[in-house]
Image (cartoon, coloured by chain):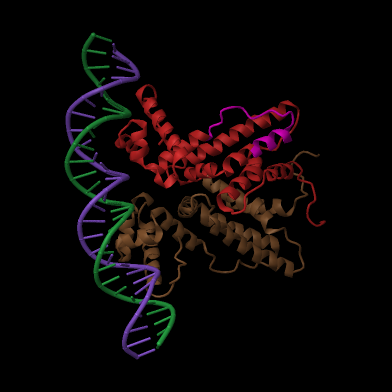
Chain colours: A red, B brown, C green, D purple
Amino acid sequence: MSPQGPRPGGRSARVQAAVHGAVLALQAERPRHEITVPLVAARAGVTPSTVYRRWGDLTELLADVAAARLRPDAAPADTGSLRGDLVAYAEQYLEEMSSPAGREVLRDLVAGAAPALPAGRCDAYVRGQLEAITARERARGGAPPPVGEIVERVMAPITYTILFVATALALADAARLVDALLAPRAAPVSPG
Amino acid sequence: MSPQGPRPGGRSARVQAAVHGAVLALQAERPRHEITVPLVAARAGVTPSTVYRRWGDLTELLADVAAARLRPDAAPADTGSLRGDLVAYAEQYLEEMSSPAGREVLRDLVAGAAPALPAGRCDAYVRGQLEAITARERARGGAPPPVGEIVERVMAPITYTILFVATALALADAARLVDALLAPRAAPVSPG
DNA sequence: CCGCTAACGCAAAATCTTAGCCTTTAGCTG
DNA sequence: CAGCTAAAGGCTAAGATTTTGCGTTAGCGG
């Protein structure tokens, strides 16, 4: 779906940029159910058939745009400690994704039915950022948990809650999850 | 979206059952992108306008069917121990939801939720089953973790992986997650 | 500079979606 | 139990979207 086809330069790239831009512009000014392929195409200065041919349908186009939106634009902030870095990253993710707009991004991503690609890209971006954070910690001489465990204990609960649970998470929950991850021997429940 | 309107009996119920049945039948024999409202309506012996009026669009209809499919049909299995009950439930959930059909159910559910609201019914069903399991444990004299913690540590990682990660989870991961939850004082990482 | 081909534009046809109006039927009341 | 009321479904026509075939354009290599 993503135009990683054999001819990425020139006109193709311009069209992709124009269409992505049109989607972003429309998302900012209209509710989602009013966004249609012909509308996007018109805004992008392109014919609808071009959009249908390249993206298949609106769902996949939105998923592609959502994935592009998630691509990290900078390395994760360096606060000087593993906990600080993780809390900062988790808080940023939580804040971005629990807004109505962010929720729509996640939804579009999941809804894109194609070979799991757009949703997979999202996870890949997250892991990339976490790799950077853990690599930094190792360079400091620390022994951070594996990225998979961070995803499992911190990112997954945040994402699940945003998608499925009515009560919103507080910013403090991000720190709570990170602390639970980093202190596996704390004893919050009844004594064993 | 669900026809919990003021007139649940009689014809309404018949139409709803016919439409749900038609969706299930079509899902079993066709790829999802070939399922359309007119197709469902024809199979259900109903006119398309009826479907549009009651469900709005195909996405919401599929979400409604998915939610109905998820409604637990029985109390969770009683294995005699908290760990056994949780592992059995988590394994069942994992097995059901990681199949292609199950993944579609989750996808439809997320995609069809109201614009700014979460796909709450799914989470509610899960919590209901977990409540039953933990209540049973308390009746045994045990002190199970709160349901929220089980969701966070077990159900959320499973669901996240199904939706966002290309590599499938193994059945054993369900047990691993339950064990990690129940033994918070194990020391799998370097000493603190 | 010339040819090759993927990608786009255009326009017609097919399909899906919406909306108005009428008919049916479940639930209620006398 | 007959009759009333309004919610819900059927039908049809108008409108919008999606698909498809064919000609054209523009990036790329020789």
Q: In this view, does C10 lie to the left or right of B21?
A: left
- Residue appearing at x 67%, y 62% in the figure: B84
Q: Is residue A136 left or right of residue A21?
A: right
x%, y% of residue B33? 36, 49
In the foreground, B88 or B31? B31
- Residue appearing at x 36%, y 60% in the figure: B53
Which quarter of the rendering shows the C terminus of chain B?
top right
The answer to which quarter of the image holds residue B48 is bottom left
Whether residue B166 is visible here, answered yes or no, is: no
- Residue appearing at x 54%, y 52% in the figure: B118
Q: What stretch is highlighted in magenta?
A: A70-91
Is residue B94 covered in magenta?
no
Q: In this view, does B122 lie to the left or right of D28?
A: right
x%, y% of residue A104? 50, 44
The answer to which quarter of the image holds residue B93 is bottom right
x%, y% of residue A163? 55, 49
Whether residue A130 is visible here, answered yes or no, is: yes
In the foreground, B91 or A172? A172
The answer to which quarter of the image holds residue B94 is bottom right
Which quarter of the rendering shows the N terminus of chain B?
bottom left
